[in-house]
Amino acid sequence: MKKLSKKRRELDVKIGLLHRQGRAKSKRIADYKKNANGFAVNAWVDRYRKKGLNLELSGNRLTIVLPEKLNFNSDLEITALNINAIRYLTKKRKVSHRAYRLGSVNFDYLKSISTSASLVLTAELSKWDDEIRNRLTPNIQNWDKDILVHFYDLGFFDLFKKKPIEIDKFKTDTSHSRRIVKYIKGRCGDDQKTRTLKTNITDMIGDQINKWMFLHGGLSEAIVNVSHHAYPKEYGFSGAEKNWYLTASFNTSEKELKVVFYDQGIGIPKSLPTSDLWEKTLEYLSIFPFVDRKKDETLLRAAVELDRTSTNESDRGKGLQDLLEFIRQRKNGCLSILSLKGLFELEVINGAESVRTDHFNNPVRGTLIIWSVFV
Amino acid sequence: MKTLNIGKDFSVDPIGRYRSDGDKRSGEAFREDFLKPTLQSLALNEILEIIIDDGVESYGSSFLSEGFAGMVKYGYITKEELLKKIEIKYTNEDFEFFKKKILGYIAAAKYNSKVYVPTQPYV
């Protein structure tokens, strides 16, 4: 046996010490692989910070600081960015104790939020609250008063065990022309909850909604579509996750009624099958330039305008067309469908229809449907 | 003439295609439990009057196509015979829209194009 040199002995001792202290290179690699999720989360956070996400860090606890405006119109990208951050950071995963975790969402700087953005934000926080067994507590000390009253009317604070006290005193201090009904959360088979929406809207507006039956039909089909397509088994959704959310608002000065429906599923473009429908979809998509064919906006348009959906039977797939009928029957209004990175919008003015599609960088994870009419 | 009043005899909230969508209120339930047995009980040349608007808020396409066109799709009756045997009735003129849909789905259905497999109610 070769006699070890002094230098080699010292090196062996050093390596042995590193192993015992857990600082040896091989163990660091094992740690990295074991905690890959933790590092992936941290890398994700760094990436999204560069995209414009406002984050505060205390130890490994993150606070997402919401911007001044949230809406899916002029501020869609930043809105989707913040919503997606909440979704990603609250997703259950096994991570290192050193990985960043979401500690809170700061509403202090929020000054304006649309009906659809407030519903989606409520849905994401509701999902987070469900996952941590209802331990979220709101800190409203520095919230804008109009925002506070808006979320109170939406029923946002019903999510929490500890509700803010003395909310009534804020109501008289604000002047806001938009009224909103309490959001409704439902699952497959809960279609009768749409009657609650009708009652709430009628109370809010003080009158019946002309052609309501067609909106009711559209909402019923949206709920059925959620049960068929939004949460497929192969994506691992649990029963408790298969939810839909519904609300409505009325702008008293502009007389605009908005009804918003949202699900947190895989999105319409992803629900189109990769095999059965592809033959028909390719036929439809062949009219588009090659680079546009796989875009979410194109697939979304295909889903709405084709007479089949993922079940590929000729008498099926009219459900998305039902969504358009309320606007068509009233001959005025707008329907927007946002799903993943695509937008489909039908606008009807005095009976004349125009369709617009668009594509954005930050996806809406799920499907968001917005009906907008003047009453 | 026999009469089938969907709102009174079946449900004021018909919804969904299969029992797994809307249980007793689905198109499948309507077809299998109401429409098919009622049509089978008709005498020769007797017509079935179907009232579609008594208390019913509205219909979705899933319900109408499965409930009515399903009769043709699963081979219970040809579309020509079905269209001769039923009369769709309503008093609210907005329901003209749904009558057209029903007749359109029946006309577009392919006779005996699918084997009927009963579904289970959603739990």
Image (tube, rainbow, N blue to C red):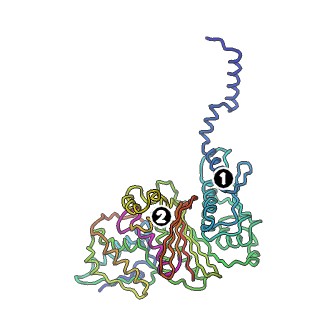
A169 on left or right of A361: right
Disc 2 marks a residue whose amino acid type is Leu
Image quadrant in which you'd find residue A228: bottom left
User: Can residue A270 be seen in this snapshot?
Assistant: no
Compared with B80, A72 (above or below) is above
Residue at 52%, 57% (x, y): give it. Answer: A238
Q: Position of residue A315 (x, y in %)?
A: 36, 69
Image quadrant in which you'd find residue A30: top right
Q: Residues within 10 Å of mark 2 (few under 14, many from 20)?
A: many
Q: Is residue B83 magenta?
A: no
Residue at 74%, 63% (x, y): give it. Answer: A139
Which residue in the protein does label 2 denote?
A300
The quadrant of the image that shows the C terminus of chain A is bottom right
Compared with A50, A321 (above or below) is below
Q: Position of residue A141 (x, y in %)?
A: 77, 65
Mark 2 or mark 1, whichever is nearer to me = 1
Image quadrant in which you'd find residue A154: bottom right
The quadrant of the image that shows the N terminus of chain A is top right
- Asked whether A122 or A162 is in front, the reply is A122
Disc 1 marks a residue whose amino acid type is Lys
Helix, strand, or loop for circle 2?
A: helix
- Asked whether A59 or A239 is in front, the reply is A59
The span shown in magenta is A308-333
Which residue in the protein does label 1 denote?
A50
Helix, strand, or loop for circle 1?
A: helix
- Asked whether A368 or A359 is in front, the reply is A359
A357 on left or right of A8: left
> How far separated are the C-alphas under marks 2 and 1?
29 Å
